Image: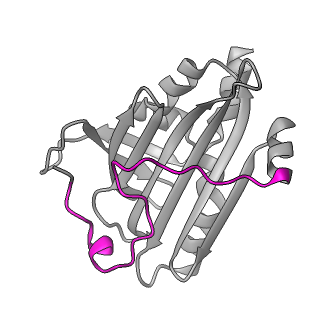
Amino acid sequence: EPPPPSPAARSGRRRCQPQGSSPELPELRPAELRRLTAGKRVQRQDLRSGSGTGFAVQDICADPDAAWDCVSDFAGYKRRIGTVRKVEAYRPERVVPGTCCYRFTVSRLGLLLDVRFAVDEEQRYARWTLEQPSWVLSDSTGYWHVQPLPGRPGHIRVWFVAAVVLAPFVPNFVVRLVSRLGLQKACSWVRDLEKKES
């Protein structure tokens, strides 16, 4: 039985992908594909009127299993993602088979995020939903995906895709912080994995 919709979903403001659905990868533009082939990260976001979506993606020369181990090691996010200050697993009030929950303390603001993950080992997807609204985020969902690249032997494509609904009356400096650093910081470890594997 799926978890009940969040308050943002019930109010019709949710722009995020429901947990359990098959994520649809963003369509990349020709210039973005050339940038990926050149070894550079592609990042795109649209944050307006209190909600938005964004993604960061990068092609690296790395073992897909090694990359997937990093993506699905949620307790290890403190070591990999610069904005994560603390991570702890917790048992939620509502237990959903096939999911796990972690509490993250994020950024210098000390933002607490209770997140439920659902993992698809075969397809190498790790989806998440925000369990409880915070003073910054009313709702958030997204996923990591490690994608094989048959046309580029030895290379993989690592995706980080997110959608957010900001809480009302969030200060502008917080909005700018979320917009500027969210995607960049979350994906900074991807290039380090390539160096480790090379």
Let me know if residue 108 appears in the view.
no
Residue lying at 34% horizontally and 40% vertically, measured from the top left: 118
The answer to whether 161 appears left or right of 15 in the picture is right
Residue 105, placed above or below residue 63: below
Toward which corner of the image does residue 13 lie, by quadrant? bottom left
Q: Residue reaching furthest top?
A: 198
Residue 83 within the magenta-colored segment of the rendering: no
Q: Where is residue 24 shown, x and y percent of the image?
A: 53, 51
Quarter of the picture holding the C terminus: top right
For image coordinates 28% across by 57% down, the residue present is 131
Q: Which residues are magenta?
A: 3-30
Q: Is residue 180 above or below residue 73?
A: below
Residue at 44% across / 31% down in the picture? 72
Occupied quadrant, residue 10: bottom left
Q: Nearer the viewer, residue 166 or 103?
A: 166
Q: Is 25 colored magenta in this rendering?
A: yes
Looking at this view, name the residue that lies furthest to the left: 93
Residue 112, x across and y down, in percent: 36, 57
Examine the residues drawn in magenta and state their main secondary structure: loop
The residue at the point 41 percent across, 27 percent down is: 121
**Image check: 53 left or right of 90?**
right
Horizontal side of 127 relative to 3 (left or right) equals right
109 and 161: which is toward the camera: 161
Q: Position of residue 40 (x, y in %)?
A: 81, 41
Q: Is residue 178 visible?
A: yes
181 sits left or right of 72 in the view: right
